[in-house]
C-alpha cells in the first residue's frame, strides 16, 4: 500500500513538473512570436511605405513632365509663328484696316484689301491706295509672290481693284503710272473712273 501511494505521489509530482515545463515553454514561444511580430511590423510598414514613396515621387514627377511637354509645345508654336512671314501694311496710312490673304505657298499670290474711311471720297481713296501701293510693291516681305491684288473698299463697297504683275513692275518717277503700267484693272466704279480722268491719273 505504501509503495502504491508513493508511486502515485511520484507520478503526480512528475506530471505537475512536466506540465509546468510545458507551460513555460509555450509562454516563451508566445513571447518569442510576439517579439517577432513586433520586430516584423516596422519592416512590413517600411515595405508598404516604400511603394507609396515611389508612387508619390512618380506622381510628383508627372506634373514636371507635363510642364515640359507644354513648354515644348509653346516653343513649337512660337517657332511656327516666327517662321510665318509678316507683311507690313504700314504704308497704307489712310486706311482704317488692311486685310491680307497670303497664298504664296499655293498660288504665289497675295490679296490685299484696303478699307478706307467712308468720309474720304472713293476717287481720292483710290488715289491714296494706288500711290501707297508703289511703296508696298518694293517691300522685301512680299518676295515669292508673282501677283498681288489690291482692292479699295469705301465702306461696304469695293470701288476699285487692280492685279499687279510683279515681274512687270518698275519703280519710276510717277508712282501711280508705275503701278498701273504693271497692273490689270479688275474693277473700277464710274465715280472713280471719272475722278481719274479728271485728275489725269488713269
Image: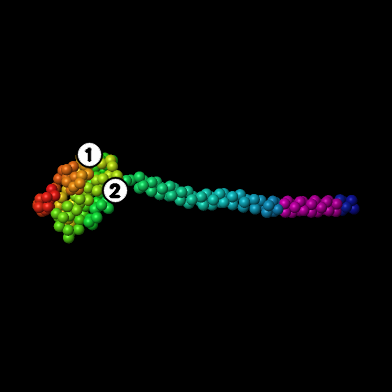
Q: Which residue is mark 2?
A: 87
Identify the residue at horizontal 18%, vertical 47% (top origin): 174
Between the residue at mark 1 and the residue at mark 2, the CA separation in whole angstroms equals 19 Å
Segment tinted magenta in the rendering: 8-32
Question: Which of label 1 and label 2 is nearer to you?
Answer: 1
Looking at the picture, how far across and down is residue 163, in whole percent? Answer: 18, 44
Tag shown at residue 167? 1
Most frequent secondary structure within the magenta stretch: helix
Residue farthest to the top, as pictured:
167
Q: Depth check: 67 or 147 in front?
A: 147
If you read the primary sequence from the N terminus, does the residue marked by circle 1 or circle 2 appear first? 2
Along the line of sight, which residue is nearer the eye, 122 or 103? 122
How many numbered marks have been drawn onto this rendered protein structure?
2
- Residue, x 15% and y 57% (percent of image)? 121
- Tell me where residue 30 appears, x and y as whole percent: 71, 53
Residue 1: x and y in percent read 89, 52
Residue 191 located left or right of residue 101:
left
Q: Can residue 162 be seen by looking at this rendering?
A: no
Q: Secondary structure at mark 2?
A: loop
Amino acid at each position: 500500500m505504501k509503495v502504491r501511494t508513493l508511486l502515485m505521489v511520484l507520478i503526480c509530482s512528475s506530471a505537475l513538473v512536466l506540465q509546468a515545463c510545458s507551460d513555460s515553454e509555450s509562454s516563451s514561444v508566445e513571447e518569442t512570436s510576439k517579439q517577432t511580430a513586433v520586430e516584423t511590423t516596422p519592416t512590413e510598414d517600411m515595405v508598404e511605405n516604400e511603394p507609396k514613396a515611389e508612387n508619390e515621387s512618380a506622381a510628383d514627377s508627372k506634373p514636371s513632365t507635363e510642364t515640359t511637354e507644354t513648354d515644348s509645345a509653346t516653343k513649337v508654336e512660337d517657332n511656327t509663328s516666327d517662321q510665318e512671314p509678316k507683311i507690313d501694311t504700314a504704308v497704307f496710312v489712310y486706311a482704317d484696316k488692311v486685310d491680307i490673304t497670303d497664298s504664296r505657298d499655293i498660288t504665289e499670290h497675295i490679296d490685299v484689301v484696303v478699307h478706307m474711311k467712308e468720309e474720304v471720297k472713293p476717287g481720292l481713296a483710290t488715289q491714296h491706295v494706288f500711290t501707297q501701293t508703289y511703296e508696298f510693291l518694293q517691300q522685301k516681305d512680299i518676295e515669292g509672290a508673282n501677283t498681288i491684288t489690291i482692292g479699295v473698299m469705301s465702306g461696304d463697297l469695293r470701288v476699285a481693284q487692280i492685279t499687279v504683275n510683279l515681274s512687270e513692275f518698275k519703280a519710276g518717277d510717277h508712282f501711280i503710272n508705275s503701278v498701273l503700267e504693271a497692273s490689270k484693272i479688275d474693277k473700277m466704279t464710274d465715280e472713280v473712273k471719272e475722278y481719274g480722268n479728271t485728275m489725269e491719273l488713269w
